[in-house]
Image (cartoon, rainbow, N blue to C red):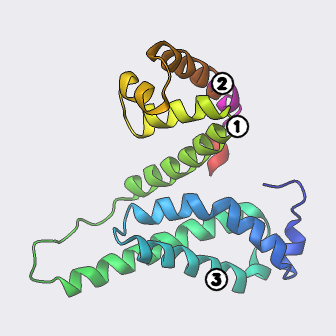
Amino acid sequence: MNQNFCFEDFRSGNEDAFRMIYEEYRTRLFYFASKYIPELEVAEDTVQEAFVKVWQKRCNFNDLDAVKAFLYISIKNQCFNFRKHSKVVHLYSNSHKEEIAEEEIMNHILESEVLDRVFKALEKLPRGCRDVMHLSYFEELKNKEVADILKISVNTVKTQKRRGLSLLKVVLKSFSFLGLF
């Protein structure tokens, strides 16, 4: 979170402080919601509704961890409600979904948090290295395909991948799984 953030400013209704919370958690919460709601617009609305609730209840929170927990729980509950509603709407179709297991929810929260950290770490890489990492690992392209797209040699792709992984290790080394919850 930004060093200029003050939780008391948020509690007292400062919109800039709220915007900082929104920017910090928006992407990972959207990713979390989209795991349960395939319609991306509905997933985005779910995240927006959770933030509206946080804003309305801002005086009830004691710290940022409580806000984060509330956001995840609120989105989880909205996803449950959406899925229940979908089951009723599609009562006679074969699209029934299994109930969401608590372990599955925790795995998706963890995945959302880790991906957020990885994407932020990727942003710190030099542009060429970042492009190679993105195409190789997120687009799942082969070294030759990456080289063709970026108009560089296959050896440069390999070098940039090694460099990127080394830099990511350094950036992510301070990452603590225990600090997620």
Q: Which mark is residue 124?
A: 1
Query: Is label 1 in contact with label 2 (beta carbons under 8 Å)?
Result: yes
Question: Callout 2: 10 Å neighbours few (<14), some, many (20+)?
Answer: some
Q: Reading the chain from its start, which is encountered first: label 3 or label 1?
A: 3
- Separation of marks 2 and 3 at Cα, in angstroms: 37 Å
Q: Position of residue 163 (x, y in %)?
A: 61, 19
Query: Is label 2 in contact with label 3 (beta carbons under 8 Å)?
Result: no
Is disc 1 placed on a helix, strand or loop? loop
- Separation of marks 1 and 2 at Cα, in angstroms: 9 Å
Q: Position of residue 116 (x, y in %)?
A: 59, 49
Q: Reading the chain from its start, which is encountered first: label 1 or label 2?
A: 1
The residue sitting at 70% across, 86% down in the picture is: 56
Q: What residue range appears in magenta? A: 169-176
The quarter of the image holding the N terminus is bottom right
Is disc 2 placed on a helix, strand or loop? helix
Is disc 3 placed on a helix, strand or loop? helix
Up the image or down, 168 lies above or below 163; here it is below
Q: Is residue 172 magenta?
A: yes
Question: Callout 1: 10 Å neighbours few (<14), some, many (20+)?
Answer: few
Say which of marks 2 and 3 sits in front.
2
Up the image or down, 145 lies above or below 86; here it is above
Residue type marked 2: Leu
Farthest residue in the front direction? 151
Residue type marked 3: Val
Foreground residue among 26 and 70: 26
Asked whether, in this view, residue 167 is left or right of residue 111, the answer is right
Residue with the mark numbered 2 = 167
